[in-house]
Amino acid sequence: MHKLNALIAGSTGYIGIQLIKLVVKHKNINIRYLCGNSSVGKKISFFDKSLVNKKLPKIIKFNKKYLKDVDIVFTALPNGEAQVISNHLEDRNVLIDLAADFRLKKSSDYLKWYNLKHKAIRNIKKSIYGLPEVTFKKVKKFDIISCPGCYPTSILLPLIPLIQKKMIYLNNIIIDSKSGYSGAGRGVHKKYKDKNLYESLSAYGVAFHRHNIEIEQEIKKHTKSKFNFTFTPHLSPMFRGILSTIYLDLKPGFSISKAYSLLKKFHKNNKFIKILNLNSLVSTNDVINTNNCYISICRSKYKNRVVILSALDNLIKGGAGQAIQNMNLKFGFNDYEGLRWKKFSFYCYYCQHVPLMN
């Protein structure tokens, strides 16, 4: 069987390692190059012992000449670096970015929210914001695919259907999201060294988290009405997982049962989305180490107010798994390819332990 060759840039971060662990299981993909900056010459098994018996190349420094040898370029790099790579893509290359380099469709928004000047403005129009359950019909047409952020993924999957059908008021959407500390990247231990990261819950980015503009941009695609929302993220004392709690007011004529039926209908063919029974409680433990997103809609003590719970694994469904989904859509591979698993182990080199293993 002919396999496509892939280059993974940013291979030693949390997302990069998780991506490697998925790609090595994909029957249609061969990992040709693993690229990094500070780890040149090392084996990837140095960072994750579960990869010790896999035949994988040693880590090398990225060079644009490698693009001639590969079909797919995965980038799990600091913001701005995938833009530079995009300016050197060969005709055969498909770039799948797991950072924010092509999520925003206005370079002015990118400058405002990321404090970086966009280095590949002409490529923005050539890219797609690839939320697979929403953009599955369009992905094939693009050679630059931007994977959504982990928080927006958990938020947009339940919100978009309700907004499209005008079921909810848009003037006061409240979103409270909690993520495992891996969502802050491998530098989280230094950044939060003065906080008890493993036993405390910390709010951050209140009102000004970068995912605000991403959520706003995507909501605008599905309504012409004015809207406002409040999004507050938190770092939780767990390694991986996201739970978003969304508070919504239903419009007159719409019941929680109708909202539930709409979510079931919208996602009935989306293999990785599970709409739970009404008023079901959701835990991150239900979804960690999988590409699934579990969504529940619950009653509140107020007649027209509902509470949506949305849980996913930030490293897989909110990261590497979503990248694999987009690749499978782009190349016509089986939806489950690379995403069938037993529970993954994830040895964390930076923590020196295996966090949250079942």
Image: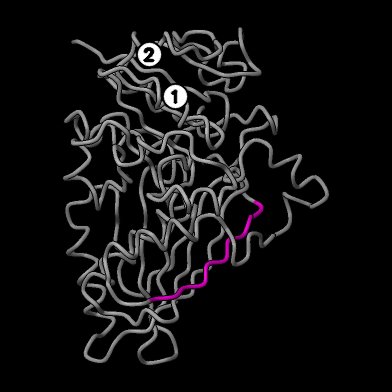
Residue corresponding to mark 1: 85
Q: Please give left or right for residue 191 compared with residue 74 in the image.
A: right
Q: Is residue 26 left or right of residue 175?
A: left
Question: Which sits in the foreground, 279 or 153?
Answer: 153
Identify the residue position indicated by label 2 in the image: 67
Badges 1 and 2: C-beta atoms under 8 Å apart? Answer: yes
Q: Is residue 236 above or below residue 349?
A: below
Taking the image as shown, residue 152 lies to the left or right of residue 225, namely: right
How would you classify the magenta stretch by its main secondary structure? strand
Q: Please give the count of numbered marks on the rendered protein.
A: 2
Q: Nearer the viewer, residue 124 or 273?
A: 124
Label 2 environment density (alpha carbons within 10 Å; few <14, some 14–19, many ≥20): many
Which amino acid, mark 1? Ile
Q: Is residue 111 magenta?
A: no
Query: Which residues are the magenta region?
Result: 227-237
Question: Which sits earlier in the primary sequence, circle 1 or circle 2?
Answer: 2
